[in-house]
Image (cartoon, helix red, strand yellow):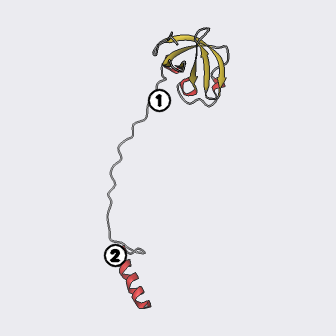
Amino acid sequence: MSTKFAAGQELKGKVTGIQPYGAFVALDENTQGLVHISEVTHGFVNDINDHLTVGQEVNVKVLSVDENAGKYSLSIRATEEAPEKPQRKERRPQASKAVSHTEDTTGFNSLKDKLQEWIDKSDMKR
């Protein structure tokens, strides 16, 4: 197979088939490639049919070429400008709260104290 198209090249193509995992796009009469569902548009695509239809003309970018297998990986989203991310609100630093560490062990025994208690109980049962 002689490579007609190179990685990084942007082309026009026509959607020839749609599968749950992506769309097949004809680059010319003899060559077609696959646009994986993750390369259809920016953001999450639940159903590819919501974005593409058979016969639709699309701009694609060649991501990679596998000469041995004759496969072209294509991307539609690489030809589109990424949407701006919404600005995150800055958090105001919170005043540090004073934490007092008191030795209130009401209802709780330290493991060291409890261990000794368990040993004593065990000795009494013998």
- Mark 1 touches mark 2? (CB < 8 Å): no
Query: SS at mark 1?
Result: loop
Q: Is residue 89 left or right of residue 4?
A: left
Q: Is residue 54 visible?
A: yes
Task: Return the mark for residue 86.
Answer: 1
Q: CA distance from mark 1 to mark 2?
A: 53 Å
Residue located at (32% from left, 65% from top): 101
Query: SS at mark 2?
Result: helix
Q: Quadrant of residue 104?
A: bottom left
- Is 111 located above or below residue 8 in the figure? below
Q: Is residue 75 visible?
A: no
Percent position of residue 5, x then y: 50, 11
- Is 43 located above or below residue 107 in the figure? above
Q: Residues within 10 Å of mark 2 (few under 14, many from 20)?
A: few
- Residue position marked by numbered label 2 in the rendering: 112
> In the image, what residue type sits under mark 2?
Lys
Percent position of residue 91, x then y: 39, 40
Percent position of residue 64, x then y: 48, 20
Q: Residues within 10 Å of mark 1 (few under 14, many from 20)?
A: few
- Is 99 located above or below residue 36 in the figure? below
- Is 66 located above or below residue 5 in the figure? below
Give whichever of 120, 101 is nearer the camera: 120
Residue located at (55% from left, 28% from top): 38
Give whichever of 112, 89 is nearer the camera: 112
Quadrant of the frame with the C terminus: bottom left
> In the image, what residue type sits under mark 1?
Pro
Give whichever of 30, 91 is nearer the camera: 30
Discs 1/2, front = 2
Residue located at (56% from left, 30% from top): 44
